[in-house]
Image: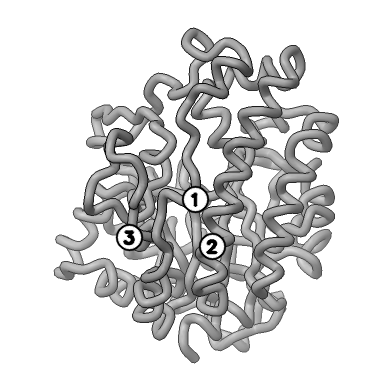
Amino acid sequence: MISRDRVRATLNQQEPDRVPMMMSASGWVIKRLKQRLGVETDRDLHRALHLDVFDTRGFDYKGAIGPKYIGPEEIGIPSDWRGDLFKVFGYHEEIIENAYGKSSAMGMPCVGVDEYPTVAELETYRWPQADWFDFSEIRSQIEPWADEFAIACTGCSVFQHPTLYRGIEQLLLELHAEREIATFIIDKVTDFYLDYFGRIFEEAGDLIDIFRLADDIGAQNNLFISPSNLDEYLAPRVRRCADLAHRYDIKLLFHTDGNVRKAIPDMIEWGVDILDPIQPEVPDMDAETLKREFGDRLSFSGGVGAQEILPRGSVEDVRAEVQRVIDILAPGGGYILAPGHPSLQMDVPTENIIAMFEAGLEYGRYPSDCA
């Protein structure tokens, strides 16, 4: 069974030949993995780890496949741009270094309140347009990957990216105190992404399997956005994303870290097909309970602990964790093996990453004795 068929089967709540697997990681982690495994290309790394999903932004979200940029030169988009949408919005990112190595961190907001305090000032910002891109070659870029892997089209956001572009604390304040401003920013981001990805789907929607929406709404212990704000700001916009994806028979993946147990019924009603990631360190996100209560209506990815097991556990600990998660989430399909954090960082030993996917290949075979 090829990867695309494997992923499609599991997302339709069927058992394929084995549990499909996917991963994202920082560029520094990817470089280290390639050196350890003796491979040079992203395709070869996918094969070496037996991964099934190719992300159009690449392993590190910095871009692998994208339309040609034909917009204003003064925006400063490089000629080799391949889908890093943060650059299009003028998002500021910083590289920091800790005891484990380098990682990316948030810089100053690109539409911060000091420079853009009102809607009038925000209207002067050069908001990106889908017309800045030529989509005519996107299909020919995706086709070589779709012959071997399932395709995840990623980079869309209706809430998380607005918080990054405005500043998290500032936008959370404006959700309550300055609703006109919050709505303006969220709509500018949402409308661009839906137009941009809609044009990609027009060209190559039949080659795409997953549309990934990144919208963190959970802290470690609870939601950090109120139910009323979920209804007002997220619900209608996530529905638009789901409608767009489903028009092309694409599954909508909703990424959010943290404890989002209370919002899961809402997500299903919005049209979400896949919840990513299951974060095992959060008690309310217990995999067994989620599978029992929602597994007939929702698929899951994640589940392998990225806060303790992967960075600090032994290879044997990682293998045991993979087997535990597969035993719970794999029966009946509806599960993609992945870390409990969307992007692995340098604190995770290379041998543990390799062990995770080797164990997935070993324990994830169907039919299984999973109970």
Give the Cα separation between the discs numbered 1 and 3. 18 Å
Query: Type of residue at label 1?
Result: Ala
Mark 1 vs mark 3: in front: 1
Of labels 2 and 3, earlier in sequence is: 3
Residue placed most toward the observer, 229 or 218? 229
Residue drawn at x 56%, y 73% as measured from the top left? 205
- Please report contact status of discs 2 and 1: CB closer than 8 Å, yes or no: yes
Q: Amino acid at mark 3?
A: Ala
Q: Which residue is mark 1?
A: 130
Residue 298 point in image, percent of width and height = 74, 63
Looking at the rendered structure, the secondary structure element under dot 2 is helix
Q: Decide: few, some or many residues near mark 3? Use Cα within 10 Å; few <14, some 14-19, many ≥20.
A: many
Marks 2 and 3: which is nearer the front?
A: 2
Badge 2 density bin: few <14, some 14–19, many ≥20, Cα 10 Å:
many
Image coordinates for residue 123, horizontal then vertical, percent = 56, 24
- Observer-nearest of 206 and 347: 206
Which of marks 1 and 2 precedes in the sequence? 1
